[in-house]
Every structure is written in C-alpha cells, then in structure tokens.
Image (cartoon, rainbow, N blue to C red):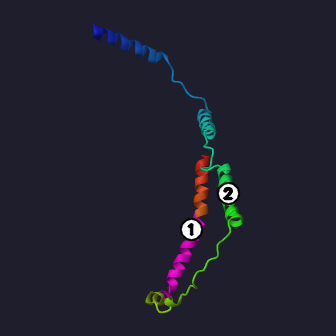
Amino acid sequence: MKEHETKELEQLIAKAMQKSTLEKPSLQFTDNVMAALIASHRTSAIVYRPLIPKYIWVAIGVGIFGITAYLWFLLQPAPLNLPALSLDFMENNPISKEVSAFTVSKITVYAFLLLALMLCVQIPMLKRYFDKQQMI
C-alpha cells in the first residue's frame, strides 16, 4: 500500500517538475543584495564611548586641585631640621665605577634607532588598516 502511494507521489512530483520552469533572478540581484548588506552593516556600527566619562575626569581634577590648595594654603608647614645630605659614599663605590665605565657600541645604537624608526612608520600604517576594517 505504501509503495503504491510513494509511486504516485513520485509521479506527481515528476509532472510538477516538468511543467515548472527555472526561475532566474533579476540582473541587479547581486548589486541589490550587496547594497542591503552594506546598509545594514553601517547602521550597526559601534559608537565609541570612553571608559571614564568627562564629568568623572573633571571631578578628579577638581578633587586633586582642592586637596593641593588645602595643603598649600591652609596647613602651616613645620620647619624641617634635616641633616645635610652627603653623597660622598658614591665616589668609592665599585658598582658606580662599573656603571660609569659602561659604553654602548655603535651597532647597538643604530639597531635601537632603526627599531624606533620602524615603529614610527608601522604605527600609522596599522592605524590606517584598522580604521579601514571598522568602515567595512
């Protein structure tokens, strides 16, 4: 019984497939889809919000200024009777003699200068790359 129903169903599907024609999309189908994708991507852009808002920075600045003003104007400084600071012990120290005798070779200086130059070139390039990634 089921075999007979499946045969009839297959014949019905075959007839329906022969009568129907292939549907073709319009010529601008790809352009329309890409335009819709770009429009939806632009609307979902992330808006930058700083981690600490401006009013918090203002409050921190006012607080630091207020504490400094309080300490500067309202507190009377007590006279300090500190002994004179002497650095004579540094003259006979073997470690300070070794540090003062240390010299850096020209190759090392050139290597660090080249590294600094490469970083100065690479940072703007990376910034431009990531800015382009966010726009897409």
> Quick one: SS at disc 2?
helix
Relative to 50, 69 lies left or right: right
How far is the residue under mark 2 from the one under mark 1? 33 Å
Q: Identify the residue position indicated by label 1 in the image.
A: 119
Question: Is there a contact, CB below 8 Å, between mark 2 and mark 1?
Answer: no
Q: Position of residue 87 (x, y in %)?
A: 54, 87
Residue depicted at 72% across the width and 65% down the height: 73
SS state under label 1: helix
- The disc, 2 or 1, on the residue closer to the chain's N-terminal end is 2
Q: Position of residue 27 (x, y in %)?
A: 61, 32
**Residue at 61% from the left image edge and 62% from the top image edge:** 124
- What is the magenta range? 99-122
Which of these two is toward me, 68 or 31?
68
Q: In the image, residue 72 lies at what x, y percent? A: 69, 66
Foreground residue among 109 and 94: 94
Looking at this rendering, what residue extends furthest in the right direction?
73
**Magenta-drawn stretch, dominant element (helix, strand or loop):** helix
The residue at the point 33 percent across, 12 percent down is: 7
Asked if residue 43 is among those painted magenta in the image, a careful observer would answer no
Q: Is residue 25 above or below residue 75?
A: above
Residue closer to the observer: 21 or 41:
41
The answer to whether 123 is drawn above or below residue 8 in the figure is below
Three-letter code for the amino acid on which mark 2 is drawn: Gly
When the figure is inspected, residue 98 is found, relative to residue 14, above or below; the finding is below
* Number of marks present in the image shown: 2
Q: Quadrant of the N terminus?
A: top left
Residue at (60% x, 29% y) in the render: 26
Disc ID at residue 86: none
Kind of residue at disc 1: Leu
Residue identifier under label 2: 61
